[in-house]
Image (cartoon, rainbow, N blue to C red):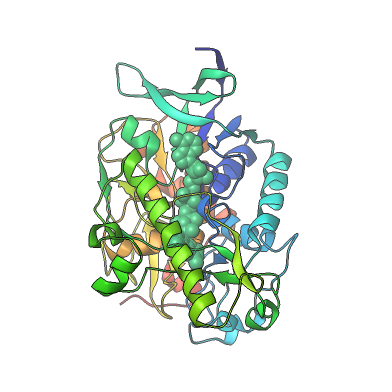
Amino acid sequence: MNFEARYEVVVTGGGIAGVAAALQAARSGKKTVLVEKTVLLGGLATTGLVYIYLPLCDGNGHQVTFGICEELIRLSLKYGPGEIPASWKTGSDLTEVKRYRCIFSPAAFMLALDEVLEEAGVDIWLDSLVCGVEKDAENHLTGIIIENKSGRGMIHGSRFIDASGDCEVARRGGAPCSASENFLSVWALQYHKDAAALSPGVGMYVGGCSAGGDPLDAETIARRGLSESDLKIEPGISGRKVTDFVLNGRRLLREHYRRAHEERGFDRNNLYALKLPAMAQFRKVYCIDGAYILQPGENQKCFEDSIGMVGDWRKAGPVWEIPYRTLYPKDGPLGLLAAGRCTSACGDAWEITRVIPTAAMTGQVAGLAAAMSLDAGVDPSGLDVQNLRRELRNLGFKLHLPEAGLEYA
Ligand SMILES: Cc1cc2nc3c(=O)[nH]c(=O)nc-3n(C[C@H](O)[C@H](O)[C@H](O)COP(=O)(O)OP(=O)(O)OC[C@H]3O[C@@H](n4cnc5c(N)ncnc54)[C@H](O)[C@@H]3O)c2cc1C
């Protein structure tokens, strides 16, 4: 090893889940490090150009998600344009004006994320790739191995939060994980001559360019230089798969602009790609097999160990309580918590846990559970969940549907 360092809480991945986890662990008084392989914070939400902060409400005027999730939605607008529509309180549909959500500038959000983490005293390590873990004989995680410009180093810690988006730490640590299939799609920021009209209040860019999410006929697939297997990506991941996914996405984009210029009356001066995603835009890759796996259809259901609630970003009505048991693996390693896309869910339930508000919420809870389990001298899996829930309520969380004026099924 070329270098080493020691922290109490070690967070892998500076996406929304990792940011929330590190913020909470540091605010709980723990010496905290956030390790990120790129030089930018926010993960898919910013470097991945996913700039829609999905709703904190149920679509019927009830806010269900609180805490750092709410702090971050406001920070996403601190240095950039956009508004949270006041009309979400009277809403009852999916449109932007009727839900507690917003569109933000990825760059502006990144500036605010650096600032809030530094204010909280989080030690940020950028351009540092987590590439291994260390465990002791009793299956406790004791360190992560990182590579950066200083060479290869060891970061020792007592609690580890996997917010890598694809269970990098959990898998290397031997935790059982589940994989999901994906489909080829790509979002990019683009200049469009009618940007201001198409995106009022934001103006400087027009949404993303999505190409390939819809079913394509065989002729179109061939014209884009792709095959069926390029569009539907089998579960699991490899270095080759990431590269193919990214290159095929860019192939779709080239085709998108070619067609827009040749067939839809645009030219390269009034419609063009402004920024490409710097992360592979897989939606779901790996999540841990937790002590509990959240199942499809488990909305409007009471969990005794609920650590917060999230709405369904696709439709008004469904609200999910998230059990604490989805944040730690059912069979070790010890000392590990998962956050964001890495928390335990399957099928349609993973659609709910993989998005920005849930990432912020589970990240904050993982940060708090890491700190509290350290103080209590127990593994996160042995933490008294009622104490954790009490602290969450002190932080402004509502944990069960009736607290938000909602009923169980
Ligand atoms: C095409 C697409 C559209 C989407 N649309 C929306 C939307 O409109 N709204 C919404 O709310 N959500 C949307 N999502 C989902 C959402 O953006 C993400 O799932 C969410 O932001 C995940 O946050 P996260 O923190 O769990 O993970 P990530 O954002 O994946 O963050 C993981 C971080 O870990 C870092 N990392 C990974 N491996 C390592 C390593 N080995 N060492 C160090 N660092 C590492 C990564 O660089 C990254 O910064 C979309 C996703 C996709 C793909």
Residue 399: horizontal and vertical position, in percent? 46, 62
Q: Is residue 101 above or below residue 110?
A: below
Q: Nearer the viewer, residue 304 or 327?
A: 327
Q: Nearer the viewer, residue 158 or 172?
A: 172
Residue 370: horizontal and vertical position, in percent? 48, 37
Q: Nearer the viewer, residue 157 or 408?
A: 157
Residue 4 visible? The answer is yes
Residue 383 visible? The answer is no
Locate residue 31 relative to residue 202 in the image: left or right. left
Residue 35: horizontal and vertical position, in percent? 55, 34
Task: List the single residue furthest toward the front.
Answer: 262
State the residue at coordinates (49%, 12%). 1
State the residue at coordinates (43%, 49%). 386
Q: Is residue 9 above or below residue 62?
A: above
State the residue at coordinates (24%, 58%). 229
For the image, the number of numbered tags is: 0
State the residue at coordinates (67%, 77%). 193
Q: Nearer the viewer, residue 151 or 71?
A: 151
Q: Is residue 312 above or below residue 155?
A: below
- The quarter of the rendered structure image containing the C terminus is bottom left
Locate residue 160 relative to residue 331 in the image: left or right. right
Locate residue 376 relative to residue 292 in the image: left or right. right
Residue 86: horizontal and vertical position, in percent? 66, 80
